[in-house]
Amino acid sequence: MEIRGPLMLPATREDIELHTLDGLTLVGELARPVEKDPVATLVTLHPLPTAGGFMDSHILRKAAARLPALADLAVLRFNTRGTTSPRGTSEGAFDGGRSEAFDVAAAMDFVRERELPHPWILGWSFGTELALKYARDHDDVAGVILLSPPLHRTTPEEVAAWAGDPRPMVIVVPEFDDYLRPAEAAERFASIPHATLVPVEGGKHLWVGESQTRRVLTEIVAAVNPDALPLPVEWHGSAEQA
């Protein structure tokens, strides 16, 4: 069968809770490869919750549905404070990217407790702001992937602080983004010489459509586990519809 849309490939999926230093419980899910250890971990940070972003925003949901089986990755998704999805509602209230520092820290604490390997922070839109602001605080973060970064809440100083950090950063920017297009992104990330900017022809901020989904998942895997490329487009085992 063709791998597209809501198809869920085999994985070990577990509802989890994260506990923040300021006393909140956040809800989420961990998806892992079946009967094998993951080679790396995606710690995902979702788009803006006040604009409908949550742990099930489609690229993150499809990463969890496909990449444990296709790329041997563990995928951690969760709702930041005050965010609701079918999994449930995380305690607290949206704080514009300030107190969400505790949410990122709680996710990384969970990664350490579970001994999940080689964690990469994967942020999308608002999630890229959290990644840029707070991923540097965690020495065990292997690298950062930014999808459609708007740079609304991240200061030039916070961006430039990554210049002295050797960890890889991959910035995936749609040609027709609503907020930051490739030429401007090249200028605003120029302070990070080692960052890799990936302009996506025809792409839009929300990455709607199977071709854009496949391109984004390919760029993620290229960074985290390139040996798994190219990603298959057909699946010949069991699968479910989400």
Image (tube, rainbow, N blue to C red):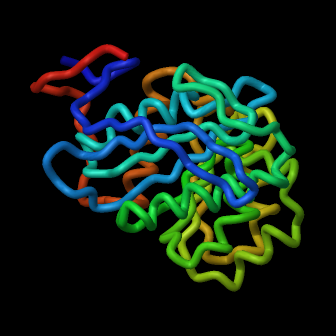
In the picture, the quarter occupied by the N terminus is top left
For this view, does 238 lie left or right of residue 158? left
For this view, does 163 lie left or right of residue 225? right
**Residue extending farthest bottom:** 164
Q: Residue 170: horizontal and vertical position, in percent?
A: 56, 60
Residue 43's place in the image compared with 125, above or below, is: below
Residue 175's place in the image compared with 121, above or below, is: above
Tell me the quarter of the picture where residue 15 sits: top left
Q: Residue 40: horizontal and vertical position, in percent?
A: 35, 61
Q: Residue at x 76, y 63 (%)?
A: 133
Tell me the quarter of the picture where residue 218 sits: top left
Q: Residue at x 77, y 74 (%)?
A: 191
Q: Residue 44: horizontal and vertical position, in percent?
A: 54, 47
Q: How many marks?
A: 0
In the picture, the quarter occupied by the C terminus is top left
**Residue extending farthest left:** 236
Residue 71's place in the image compared with 164, above or below, is: above
**Residue extending farthest top:** 241
Q: Residue at x 26, y 17 (%)?
A: 240
Q: Nearer the viewer, residue 163 or 69?
A: 69
For this view, does 240 lie left or right of residue 138? left
Q: Residue at x 68, y 41 (%)?
A: 80
Q: Residue 34: horizontal and vertical position, in percent?
A: 18, 43
Q: Nearer the viewer, residue 113 or 169?
A: 113
Q: Nearer the viewer, residue 136 or 211?
A: 136
Tell me the quarter of the picture where residue 162 sits: bottom right
Residue 106's place in the image compared with 123, above or below, is: below
Q: Nearer the viewer, residue 126 or 185?
A: 126
